[in-house]
Amino acid sequence: MRAADPVPREVAGFLRCATPPAWFEAALEDQPTLLLDHANCEKKAASTALGMMFRYELRPDLAAQMSRLAREELRHFEMVEQLLDERGIERRRLSPSRYAGGLHELVRGEEPHRLVDRLVVGAYIEARSCERFARIAPMLDSQLNAFYTGLLNSESRHFMLYLDFARRFCAPGDDIELRIQVIGEREAALITSPDPQLRFHSGLPMTSNSL
C-alpha cells in the first residue's frame, strides 16, 4: 500500500513540481548547512513581513497580518537558533540562495501589480518550505522530525495567507491566475535546475556538499 503524501493537499496542488530526491540526499549529508540556512530563511521571512507592513500601512488588514506573521517567523528563528546551540553547530556566514532573487526578478514595478506579485512570490516560498518540511521530516532524527513536522501547519497557513491577499488585491483586468502560473514556472525551474549551492530553497545539487 502506497504511503500517504505528507504534503498538505493545497500545497502539493499549488507547486508546479516536487523537490527532486537528490536535494534531500544532499541535505541529509550536510544538515549543519541546512539548519544554518533555515535560520537565515526565518530572519528573511520576518524582514519581508515587516517591510510589507511599513510599505503598505494604508492597507491596515494586510499590515496587521504581516505584523503577526513577522512575530511568528522570528519565533521560528529563535527555535532554529536553539537547535544550532544544542547541536554545537558553529555559526558561519552563508552566501544567499539564488531562489528568492530569481523569483523577485518577475515582480512588476508599478502598484498594485508589485504588491500582487510580491504576495504570489511569498506564497511560493512558504509553499516550498512546507513541502520540504513535510518530506524531509521522516528522514531526520526524532528531534528534527518533531521540529519540522510541527512547522507544517504554520507554513501552510502562511502560504494561504499570501495567496489570499494576492487574490484580494489583484487589480481589475489583471489576470491573477496568469501571474501565479508565470511565477510558478520560474519557481519550478529554480527547484529542478542545477544549483552550485546547498540551501533550504536550492535547486538540483551539483555536488552533495557545495557551500
Image: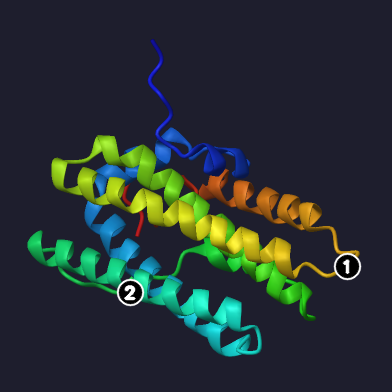
Percent position (x, y) of residue 124?
57, 55
Q: Residue at x 29, y 45 (%)?
A: 149
What quarter of the picture does the C terminus occupy? bottom left
Residue farthest to the right?
Answer: 173
Q: Residue at x 55, y 89 (%)?
A: 54
Of residues 121 and 195, the one nearer the viewer is: 121
Percent position (x, y) of residue 179?
76, 58
At label 2, which amino acid type do we have? Leu
List the residue tagged with mark 2: 74
Judged left or right of residue 165, residue 202 is left
Whether residue 177 can be seen here:
yes
Residue farthest to the top?
Answer: 1
Whether residue 196 can be seen here:
no
Q: Which mark is residue 52?
A: none
What quarter of the picture does the N terminus occupy? top left
Q: Is residue 55 above or below residue 195?
A: below
Q: Residue at x 33, y 74 (%)?
A: 74
List the residue tagged with mark 1: 172
Contact (Cβ within 8 Å) of mark 2 with mark 1: no
Q: Is residue 34 above or below residue 132?
A: below
